[in-house]
Image (cartoon, coloured by chain):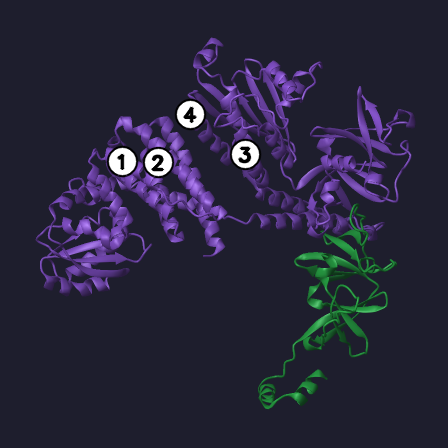
Amino acid sequence: MGDSILDMYLYETNTLLEQLDGILLTAEQADTFSEDSVNEIFRIMHTIKGSSAMMEFSSLMTVAHRIEDMFFIVREKGMDVVPEQTKPELFDMLFQAVDFFRGEIEKVENGDPLSQSIDNIVNKINSLIDKIQGNPAAPAEEAPAADESAPAAEAAAPAVSAVNQDYPYGIHAFFDEGSGMENLRAFMLINNVKDYCGDFICVPENVETDPSTSDIIADQGFFVWFRTADDRSSAIPGVKNAGSVREYQPVDAAKPAPAPAQEAPKAEAPAPAAPAPKAEAPAAKSAPAPAPAAGQQHAKESLISVNLSKLDQLLAVVSEIVITESMVTASPDLKGLRLDNFTKSARDLRKLTDDLQDVSMSLRMVPVSGTFQKMNRIVRDMSKKLGKKAKLTLIGEDTEVDKTIVDAIGDPIMHIVRNSMDHGLEEREEDRIAAGKDPVGEVILSARHTGSEVIIEIRDDGQGVDTQAVLNKAIRQGLAAPDHDYSQKEILNFLMMPGFSTNTEVTEYSGRGVGMDVVKKNVADVGGTVSISSEWGKGMTTTLKIPLTMAILDGMEVSVGDSMFTIPINSIQSSLKVTAQEVIHDPAQGEMVKIRDNFYPIIRAKELFCMDQGCDNIEDGILMWVESGEHSYCLFVDELLGEQQIVVKPLPSYINSFNVKNFGITGCSILGDGSISIILDVINVYTAAHNIY
Amino acid sequence: MAKTEELMFATEAQIDEYTDQIPEISTEKYLIFSSDGLMYGIKAELVKDINTDYTITYLPRVPNYVRGVINLRGQIVPIVDIRLRLGKLPQDSFCCVVVNVDGNEVGILVDMVEQMVDVPLDAILPVPTSSGQAMVSGMCTLPDGHTMLELDCELLLHD
């Protein structure tokens, strides 16, 4: 089995599940399924069933199949068939099923064995089907189950006994798997058979008018029953010649056992039994089904999925073109020449390369809506679990950010939303009403662009952060000094320290001690920052500021000797010149400087990086005051060269094998003149310097 | 030359083979370069670039034989000085041979690139174990009488 097929499968199934989640959430709000969504769910389940069967993931296939069966009934009979009191159960079951699919898919992704025990969920679906059919009898539950586990031949058993006893001689035909339109193929088969013998009946009937029979035929085969064995043998050529027939076999009806004969029509699902009186109705009902499906298909074809590494490659080549272009047009060989045509062409080229760069960057951009939509589900689940009424409002879902960033911020956002639901919103509705708020809590998730950053805000209108409680906890944890005055901002920052969790009880959703610190780390990994603001009684806002793309960085170029280094702008506080008198020495040869009532260590880049050249005299160079995470210090360099947007290039893996990352060297970038600048990671520079001294 | 030798010692069956089809001796193109008076060879298919005009950017905190990185058409390529790697005294080498080792491109600083030769694969002999010459995976006598040491690029990068 090719990996590419598996990739396709995973991609497709994940997309379908996300779609399904969305449908379910809308449907639950409306407390019913629209005709479109029933069709859509049916289609999704059908696709999952089919592709899982192809990949031999039987657990997925079985569950999808049962849900498909259930929605088949709903589709046929309309949503009214579901009793009012069963609806919540139905929604819960469907959400559970989505989770089950997700879990299984995850196992597939990790190469773990799939779960074998799916009885629990299958039974749930079966009992729901019974309720929908208004048929609480136990045997009916057995029947579909048997139907399920036993493929073709055995599944035929109930059907065999179900036919008219006047037509005991049957042919059981199967069409090529995945040939599609089985009902029409069956109809052609009937026409063929008619040429040989006119007196027969078929199961299911109405194949021509009822497209929904095609699934039954695909699953259970198509039966043609004759009065005599001779009729049958004369008709066999007709069956044989019909298109796409994979296999056929003569079957004789067993002596009709009374019990199954009665149950069979129920087990057979409604198609063969129900359509007879209202053959028109289902046909009309299923007519809209192909239309939206076709529309979807069409929209899908205009999208292709591309391996991310190819896009990375493209972006790398494009950024090289941009640099090379500026090397050509600014070539020193051209100095003093007056080249009108060249200048004009060069200008055109510049414009085109700019466009090219924009387009290739936009390829990697995806809207955050996928990540945002997932939160709907979390809010729904938690509000049920915790008994808090809450709604989620999404703003700016179509904001686009780099794909790697979208992937990286999913978990942090989820964590914050959970926190808001769990700790943010008031425990009891009365508290909200007493505070003059809407009894239904609100979590607002918003995204917007500002220049080169995307800002994601998670805001809740809950009780806000009890700063005193946080401070007390921080003191107990040894994170804060008891006799120090902390500003509100500083206190809120304690929330993001490792091992800090205010809730004394560990709940199912949050408060496992791994909390905001992990969020902060994940966001920092993609070059972003987290900040919290809160007003007691009014709620809390968590803001994530994330660069639009990781491939481009705003950096400050500094030099040490001949070498150039890039410090990310967002970690720079300021640059300053100091005199030798301002430098404070400690006994361990460490140097410090005092900035605004605080002492900061000085790290000399020249010494840290063992360089031959560069300034030694503190007055000749310049101090870059940088801050990242909890660390704040001054990096001593020779000169400040200027701010520049750079394309980040990872270090060659050979260089990485020397662990230069631990010394704060995270990558390189190629400057406009072709020279290489080394990108520094402020945190690791500090740790490295700390370990050396 | 090697072909005639083989023909002379070939058995009858082998002669048939040779007469039936165009005689084919598997040879491999090698790039020969010198470093510190020794001739080294690298399979030519691994060589991506030969460059004499480059600026090495110093990279801190790497072993001294890694001289830094260069910008090769937009790619960051690390540079290994083979003299330092083999524990010899450094010298101002001016030629950089960029080779592909395991998908990673690495530049090797050498004294001079000499020539390209076709070397029959069976002419490459194993290195006597007693020989202290590291990073060499085979040796072979060239038509001009010099001895080529086949450089083991993997060993050059990883100990």
Mark 3 is on which residue type?
Asp
Chain for disc number 2: A
In front: A333, or A246? A246
Same chain check for tags 4 and 2? yes
* Label 2 CA crowd tier, 10 Å (few <14, some 14–19, many 20+): some
Q: Position of residue A215 (x, y in %)?
A: 28, 48
The residue labelled by disc 4 is A385
Using the numbered discs, state the Cα–Cα distance from disc 3 to disc 2 in whole angstroms.
29 Å
**Foreground: disc 1 or disc 3:** 1
Alpha carbon distance from label 4 to label 2: 26 Å
Work out how far the residue at label 1 is from the one at label 3, CA to CA, in angstroms: 35 Å
Pointers 4 and 3 within a single chain: yes
Contact (Cβ within 8 Å) of mark 1 with mark 3: no
* Other residues around mark 1 within 10 Å, as few (<14) / some (14–19) / many (≥20): some
What secondary structure is found at the residue carrying circle 4? helix
Q: Identify which residue is drawn at 31% across, 29% down.
A: A87
- Tell me whether marks 4 and 1 sit on the same chain: yes
Q: Nearer the viewer, mark 2 or mark 1?
A: 1
Residue reaching furthest to the front: B130
Which residue position is annotated with label 3?
A411
